[in-house]
Amino acid sequence: MLTETSLSIWGWGSLGIVLSLITFGPFVIFYLAFYILCFVGGGFVVTLLFGKTNSEKYLEQCEHSFLPPTSTGIPKCLEEMKREARTIKIDRRLTGANIIDEPLQQVIQFSLRDYVQYWYYTLSDDESFLLEIRQALQNALVQFATRSKEIDWQPYFTTRIVDDFGTHLRVFRKAQQKITEKDDQVKGTAEDLVDTFFEVEVEMEKDVCRDLVCTSPKDEEGFLRDLCEVLLYLLLPPGDFQNKIMRYFVREILARGILLPLINQLSDPDYINQYVIWMIRDSNCNYEAFMNIIKLSDNIGELEAVRDKAAEELQYLRSLDTAGDDINTIKNQINSLLFVKKVCDSRIQRLQSGKEINTVKLAANFGKLCTVPLDSILVDNVALQFFMDYMQQTGGQAHLFFWMTVEGYRVTAQQQLEVLSSRQKDGKHQTNQTKGLLRAAAVGIYEQYLSEKASPRVTVDDYLVAKLADTLNHEDPTPEIFDDIQRKVYELMLRDERFYPSFRQNALYVRMLAELDMLKDPSFRGSDDGDGESFNGSPTGSINLSLDDLSNVSSDDSVQLHAYISDTVYADYDPYAVAGVCNDHGKTYALYAITVHRRSLNSEEMWKTYRRYSDFHDFHMRITEQFENLSSILKLPGKKTFNNMDRDFLEKRKKDLNAYLQLLLTPEMMKASPALAHYVYDFLENKAYSKGKGDFARKVPPLIPKTDSDPEHCRVSAQLDDTVDDNIPLRVMLLLMDEVFDLKERNQWLRRNIKNLLQQLIRATYGDTINRKIVDHVDWMTSPEQVADLVKRFRDAFWPNGILAETVPCRDKAIRMRTRVAGKTKLLSIMPDELKHIIGAETTRKGILRVFEMFQHNQLNRRMVYVFLEGFLETLFPQYKFRELFNRLHSRSKQMQKYKQKLQTTQAPSLQKR
C-alpha cells in the first residue's frame, strides 16, 4: 500500500515538472528561487526597521530615568579636539652660540626624522606631537648648556680623566698578573681576562663593579634607559617630564638612538686601532719595529693574517713580467716577503706546540753575550740601574755610591767655582762662604764613606785616606780632591771578582742587555748624553742637602724663636712689601711677610723675612725627608694649581701657614728633633731663601708617597697629593708612567732620572708656564668653536650628507688582525729614543704593548667609556648624589655580590671572637 502511494507521488510530481518546463520554459527554476529570496529578505528588513524604531523610542523614554547627566567637560574636550591645532613656535636658540646651535638643530631634526616621523606619519598627520617632542629636546639641551657654562672643567680634564684612565690601566695590569700567576703554562683566554679584570675592579673600587653593564646587552640597555630618565628629570620642565608618552619617546631616542650607537663605536677595538693609525699617520712604519711585533706576537690570528697577505703579495710579484733594473727590485721584495712568511710560520708552529722560548733565559744559558765595559755602564741610565741592583745584592753598594757621589761633587764644585769667579770679576766677594760650603760637602762625603765611623766603609789604601784628611784640614777643597780615591774604587769594582766580573755572569746582566736591545745586536747603544751625565748624590739619600743648605748655624737651647705671618695686602712687585700678589717677569705669585722674634739670655732681635708658598713647600719637603717622624705631625696646606690668586684663598692659606709655623716652633717639637733648629733658623733668616735645587745632592721626593693602604689596591688619585709637588702636570705624568711601564719595582735612582727627564721635556716645551698652558688648553677645548666642531663631527658620523648612516659591516677578521699589527708597529715606531735610554728598550716595548692590548677587549673599553661618562655627569651635577645613584644602578653586579659574600665570610670569625 505504501509503495503504491509513493509511486503515485513521484509520478504526479514528475508530470508537474515536465508540464511546467514545457509551458514556462527552462528559466522557471530561477524565477522561483528569486521570488522566494525576495520574500525572505523583505521580511527581514521589515523586522529590523521595526525593532530599531521601537528600541530608540524605549531608550528615549528611559534615558533620564536610569543614566546620570553627561559631564560638561567631555563636550568641551571634543570641541577643543575639533578645533584647528594651534601653531607651536620653536625658539631655535639653544646654547647662545649660533655656531653650536645650527648643527645641534640639524641633529635634532635628523633624530626626529629617522626615529619618530617614519612611523608616526602612518598613524597621524597631526604635527603638534612632533613639535612638542622637539620642544622637549630643546628644553633639555638649553638646561644642559646652561649647566655646562657654570662648571669649572679644568679639574675634570686635568685630574679626573687622568685618574680614571690610570686606574683602568692599573686594574688591567693587575688582571694580567693574576692570569699569569694562575698557571704559567696555560695561556688564559680573553674571557678569563675579562672575568679577572672585573674581579680586580671590585677589589679596587670596593663599592661598585660594572661587569653587567659591559657584558650583558640587555642590562646595558636598561642602565642607559634609567640614566636617561634621571637626566630628563633634571633637565626637562616638570610638565614635560610628567607626560609619560613624550618622556618615553625622548628616553628611547637618547638611549637607543644616540648613546648606545656612540658607545658601541667608541668601544670597538677595530675602530680604536684605526683611530690610532690615523692619529700617527705622519709617522713612517719602521721595519725593525714591524719585525719585533711579529716575533713577539702571541696571537695566532695576527700571524696568520700577515702570512696570508705576504703569500698574496708573493703570488702577485711572481706573476709580473719585468726586465732590466726592475727585476732586482722585485727580487729584493720577494726575498723580504719570504723572510716575513718564514718568521710567521715558525712563530705559529711554536705557539701551537706550546713551546714558547724565553729569549732572556735562552741567551743566559746558551747565547754568546756581548761585553759592555764598566765605564759605559756607569754613564748609561738603564745599565747603571741593573749594576746598582747587583752591587746591593753583593754588599758593594758603598763603592758604587761613593763613585757616583764624587762625580756629583766634581760637577757641582766646578759650577760653584765658576760662579764664584764670575762674581769676583763683578766686584762681589763671597769667597769664604762658597769655600766653606765646598769644604762642608767634602767633609760630609769623607765622613760617610771613608771615615772610621762610616758604615759601610769604602775599603781603599789607608795612606790615600790619610792624605785626603790632611788636605781637607789644611787646604781649600777643589773639584779634583777625591780623584785618587775614586780611581782606586773604580779599579776595585772593575777587577774584584765580587763585582763587575761576577756581574757579567749574573742574570741581571742578561736582563740589562735585553733592556739595552743588545741580545740581537752586539753594538753597544747607550745614552746619547752619557758623557755629560752627572749623578746628584747617592740613591740612598746619603747627602740630603745641597751646598747652599750647608750653613754653620747651630742650635742653642737658651734661644727662643717666635714667628707669624703679617696680614695679606695686595701690592705690585716689591721684595719689601708686607705681603702680596707679585708679578716678576710675567710670573704671578703670592709673597708672605714673616715677622720673626728671637730671644736669648743677653739679647732680643726682630726682623722680617719674605717667603713664597713654594719656599714653604721646599722647606717642608727637606725637614720631612730628614726627620721622618715629622711627616705624620706637620701638614703643609695643600696646593691649588688653578685660580690660586683669589683673595679668599690667600687669606685661608695665610692662616694655615701661620698654624703650621706655630706648631713647628713649639718647644716640644724642637726638643724632639734638636737638629731641626738648624733648618728652621736658615728658613727664617733675613735673606733670600735658597731652595734645594742644586745639582749636587737635591733630595727628590718619592714618585709615590707613602700611604697607609696598599697603593696597588686603590685608585691612582689616592696617590696624588697636592702638597708633594708644585707641578701637578708633572706629577700626573709620573703616575701614568708608573702604570704604563710598571716602574714601582725600580730603584729610586731610576725614578729620579725619569722625573728629571720629564721636567726637561716640560720646560723645553712650555717653560715655567705649563699650568697656564693647561688652563688655556682646557678653555680652548670648551670654547664654542671646538664644541661646534665636535657636534659637526658627531652629525657627519651618524648622518653623512644628511642621511642616516647604515650599519657598518664588520670588517673581515684578517683585515682587523693586520690593522692590529699596523697599530702596534706605529706605536713602537714613535717611541722616543730618550725614553728607551731612561727605562730600557724592553720595558718600553712591554709598556706600550700593554696599553695597546688593553684596548683590544670590547668589554673593557665599554667599562672605560662608562667611567668617563660617570665622571662627566658627577662633574656636571655636583649637587646631586650621582655617585650613590651609579652604585645603585650597578648593585646587581655578580662580582659585587661575590665580593660582599667574601667580605662577610672573612669578617665572620673576627665578629665571633668579639
Image (cartoon, rainbow, N blue to C red):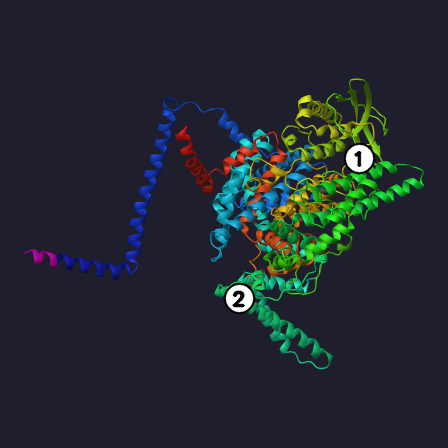
Locate the N terminus by quadrant: bottom left
* Residue 5 colored in magenta in the image: yes
Residue 90 in the image: state x and y as whole percent: 66, 36
- Name which residue type carries label 1: Ser
Residue 246 visible, this orientation: no
Front one among 327 and 102 = 327
Q: Which image quarter: residue 814?
A: bottom right
Residue 241 in the image: state x and y as whole percent: 55, 32
Please state if 318 lies on the left or on the right of 889 as rendered. right
- Name which residue type carries label 2: Ile
Q: Is residue 576 above or below residue 159?
A: above
Q: Which image quarter: residue 450?
A: top right
Majority secondary structure of magenta residues: helix
Q: How many marks?
A: 2
Residue 13 visible, this orientation: yes
Please state if 237 lies on the left or on the right of 378 as rendered. left
Looking at the image, the residue that sits furthest to the left is 1
Residue 288 in the image: state x and y as whole percent: 66, 64
Q: Residue 348, which numbered label?
A: 2
Q: State which mark lies toward you, 2 or 1.
A: 1
Residue interval drawn in magenta: 1-7
Q: Residue 194, which numbered label?
A: none
Locate the C terminus by quadrant: top left
Give the residue displayed 8% in from the left and 58% down from the top. 3
SS of the residue under disc 2: helix
Gap in angstroms between the C-alphas marked 2 and 1: 62 Å
Residue 854 in the image: state x and y as whole percent: 57, 51
> Disc 2 or 1, which lies upstream in sequence?
2
* Callout 1 crowding tier (Cα within 10 Å): few <14, some 14–19, many ≥20: some
Q: Which residue is mark 1?
A: 690
Looking at the image, the residue that sits furthest to the bottom is 323
